[in-house]
Image: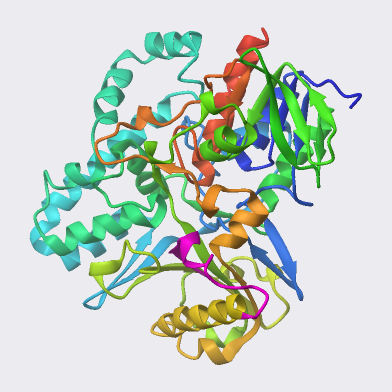
Amino acid sequence: MNESPDVIVIGSGIGGLTAAALLQDRGISTLVFEKNRYPGGSCSSFQREGYSFDAGASVFYGFGENRQSGTLNLHTRIFRKLGLEVPTLRDPVQIHYHLPNGFSLPAHYDRDAFLEALSARFPHERAGIEKFYSELEDVHDILSSLPAGSLEDPFHLASVGVTFPAKIIQLAVKTFRSMGKTARRYIRDEELLKFIDIEAYSWAVQDAVSTPLVNAGICLADRHHGGINYPVGGSGAIPKALCQGIEKSGGQIRFQSEVTSIIVENGEARGVRLADGSECFAKAVISNATIWDTFNHLITDARYKVDENRFLRAPSWFQLYLGVDASVIPDDFYVHHILVDRWENYNQPGGTIYFSAPTLLDPSLAPPGKHIVHAFVTADVDEWEQYDRKNGAYQNAKEAFAAKVISRTESILPGLANAIEVKVLATPMTHQRYLNRFKGSYGPLLKPGQNILQKPQNTTRIKNLFAAGDSTFPGQGVIAVTYSGVSCASYIARQFGKPLDELI
């Protein structure tokens, strides 16, 4: 290829796009290669018969307006920096939980309302509830005052350490603590501890003991500050705006251009090779792929191979995208829900149902008089590889599994099955095929006892090869991978002698 950009980005996931947009804005030329015809990866939108469905992500942090929100309102700060606007709609409830034993609780934006509702269910634990959630507030307060940057950049660390020495010490102590173990310092009721487990599982796909306290402070405290805000037009509005930012400053995104390998010479990343055999070279390469796809597929040298057992593998998903008659959704229904039938299997494949009805916020996503129901459960690719596509077994298995999920969902949405007018189903194999994700997984999870700083960072063992996305610190979720993109761009820009301006 004739192009010789400063930085090549593999994949247009949110982490990679964020890094590319910030680098390009700083005058460091970028070229993004994307396999599909649209950007965003699992944070994208697709259209069917007049409906615009969120491919994956549907709960969005990071759009808060508070200028003191530090690393927690990154979308607001990034789009302000790029001179772009992504309109959003405030959601008054993060998630409405529907749990065993008639336990029903909406997690309100209003923190006092949430804590009062939880305390009404567990009046004997009122003091413990306040103390535990205050621990999360403390983490939020620290992160709200710290600027975003790379933990691998000594200049950034020195600057933050000099400016906020006390907060850095406090954060360092909390970094070694688990959400679940912290909860058990204050709370004894087993049902309440199960609720705190599902609070963690709702976004970390792990129980509270396995979830770092710092991550919990972001997701379970910021919902009461920056809040949950849905982008107008759906999840695809976020990657679309990032692409506009890249192209506005002269960068390029090449769609339908699949990278098949990273060119490494003498331990240094030199460029990429595409499916059509062409090659493109750059001074640095950023991989937005999972750690396993990067080092066990795109890198062919066995010396860099990553053992699958080094981390836990996050599950994949079975997803139902449903276009339904609007009459099936009650007027007082919230947008996001989690349904658990039995505590015994909430963390097993299919045990917890997540679903959202985004058209309650943005009716433009569906035809008049219609709504969207996006339902999904955890699943593993191994369950689906056994079915033969050619004889219809795979399709029949999808339909049968979807019918079970729909039937369970009717406990809170009666009549759902008969209201469905459009139905699109996706298995872990769909995620593996379209998103080039190892076994359809959403990246590595920490094992119990591992510290959050043991997550892979942006630098790798290969010189000038960097990583962004859910395989890197701080982990899964749109706001988390956005942070990874900011961190990656910050580190690379410093290496190019063009440090990023602080996001304000």
- Asked whether 391 falls inside the magenta stretch, the response is yes
Q: Quadrant of residue 216?
A: top left
For the magenta stretch, what is the residue range? 375-392
- At x 70%, y 33%, the residue is 261
Q: Position of residue 2 (x, y in %)?
A: 91, 24
Q: Nearer the viewer, residue 140 or 31?
A: 31
- At x 36%, y 60%, the residue is 107
Q: Nearer the viewer, residue 504 or 467?
A: 467
Q: Nearer the viewer, residue 386 or 13?
A: 386
Q: Position of residue 315 (x, y in %)?
A: 44, 55
In the picture, measured across the screen, residue 182 lies left or right of residue 351, that is left
* Any part of residue 233 in sight: no
Q: Is residue 51 above or below residue 85?
A: below
Q: Position of residue 106 (x, y in %)?
A: 35, 66
Q: Is residue 89 above or below residue 15?
A: below
Q: Nearer the viewer, residue 315 or 169?
A: 315
- Asked whether 127 falls inside the magenta stretch, the response is no
In the picture, measured across the screen, residue 24 lies left or right of residue 444, that is right
Q: Position of residue 194 (x, y in %)?
A: 21, 60
